[in-house]
Image: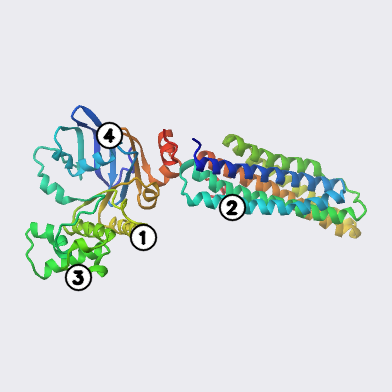
Amino acid sequence: MAAAAANVLIQVENLSLYYGSSKALESINLTLRDKLVTAFIGPSGCGKSTLLRCFNRMNDLIDGVKIEGSIRIGGHDIYARDVDVIELRKRIGMVFQKSNPFPKSIYDNVAYGLRIQGMKSGSSLDEAVEQSLRGAALWDEVKDRLHSSALGLSGGQQQRLCIARAIAVKPEIILMDEPASALDPIATSRIEDLILELKKDFTIVIVTHNMQQAARISDDTAFFYMGELVEFGPTKKIFTNPTQKRTEDYVTGRFG
Amino acid sequence: MERHFEHDLGELKGKLLIMASYAERAVSDAVDALVNRNLELALQVKANDEILDHLEMEIDESAITLLARAPLASDLRLVTVAMKISQNLERAGDEATKIAKRARDLAKEPPLKLTLPWVQMSTLALGLLKAALDAFVNRDSTAARALIPRDKEVNALHKEIQQRLIAHMKENADNIARCLHFLVAAKSLERIADHATNIAEEVVYLCEAADIRHADKV
């Protein structure tokens, strides 16, 4: 199931996850490569978002979740006892389906994480905010209204603002849970171009229901079904010639 | 409930099969007209070429409509392969027309006193075309792979016809015009076998997602 052994950043081994007594993930083994885009696809309820949320331990916040197996990021088990979850989440940013800017100014949204990290107002904060907004391909659209409310931005702009906020603290990994599913084709295309730019500096894992989106932007694709990893491999292979019949049936829309 | 996509994909396949039967018929009639000096049949092949041209455009249009719906995996392979097969069939039809034109001109001249392996070569070339199309219908990549090396046999017969015509021309300068017609017809038949081989390669891609074109040169 492993892609190329080189540049492994995230290694998932025999990972099972239970919500109470129901098993949501079944012995997942998966290696994700550094500075590449990996797409998670599969029908609703297949476990792809659950797995995504394991990478920054978001599932810890849900009562009754039990996890077995291990996830190593850069060789370190992120479920080890001594792991500081806050530190972990600094290394792993997340962007959600519904953009969730804080009800603050554009500037303050991006500066938020940096201020928590102790950065004081001043020219270096201004610079970091500008750099993040440029990195999220939003700078030109907002540079003249940095201090107006983020809630006044369009849906696509809000989503790019959330990406700017995520990259401001320089994480290693960005998790994206259907980041463009609520956006129109133009805004979607901007987000997709942005993802392709971001992979120069970040490792990206994206959950998407849009097969063509996965085909356009990801290097590797994992197909999940009912909590199992059915197939994992180079995106080109998954979408032109999948090995498993269940994958073929799903990507051609012949499922069930 | 049948999916609309599946239905439209079925229609595309149907059009391709109709086109295949026209192309096979064109090749077989053209060779028949050449060998049996049948002027009427030659003219008919020429007239029917329009049908193939039209089918090629229809198949492209259907394929583009299907591609706009962004098919994946085996559906994606089928649609792209259909476009390539139809192009090869259209070109095979063009070659059949070239043979038919030479047959038309030769039918107006006295026969050449030279026996050439036309039947052998045309049986082989047409056989390859049929086998390639059968492999497509049956999605049989083993059969497709098996027919590809047989193109060499066609090439050998083409060379033989070429050499014998050249030798004949050296001895009979008066027959050069007619020999040139036969040379062109032989070349066209050889090209038809190449198109059959191309189709077989597409069938292998359709079944296995393996690109085996130019495998001997890479």
- Of badges 4 and 2, the one in the foreground is 2
At mark 1, the secondary structure is helix
Whether labels 2 and 1 share one chain: no
What residue sits right under mark 3 in the picture? A145
What residue sits right under mark 1 in the picture? A186
**In the depicted structure, whether residue B173 falls above or below residue B203:** below
- Of badges 2 and 3, the one in the foreground is 3
Amino acid found under the numbered disc labelled 1: Ile
* Residue found farthest to the top: A21
Q: Which chain is mark 3 on?
A: A
Q: CA distance from mark 4 to mark 3?
A: 46 Å
At mark 3, the secondary structure is helix
Q: CA distance from mark 4 to mark 1?
A: 35 Å
Q: CA distance from mark 2 to mark 1?
A: 28 Å
Please give the label number shown on residue A28: 4
Across and down, in percent, residue B208 comes to: 51, 39
What residue sits right under mark 2 in the picture? B60
* Chain-order first, disc 4 or disc 3: 4
Across and down, in percent, residue B52 comes to: 69, 51
- Of badges 4 and 1, the one in the foreground is 1
* Chain-order first, disc 4 or disc 1: 4
Q: Which chain is mark 1 on?
A: A
Around disc 1, counting alpha carbons within 10 Å, would you say few (fewer than 14), some (14 to 19), or many (20 or more)? few
Across and down, in percent, residue B103 comes to: 83, 52
User: Residue at 43% across / 44% down in the picture?
Assistant: A239
Q: Is residue B81 left or right of residue B69?
A: right
Residue in the foreground of this view, choosing between A191 and A198: A191
Q: Which chain is mark 2 on?
A: B
Whether labels 1 and 3 share one chain: yes
Q: How many marks?
A: 4
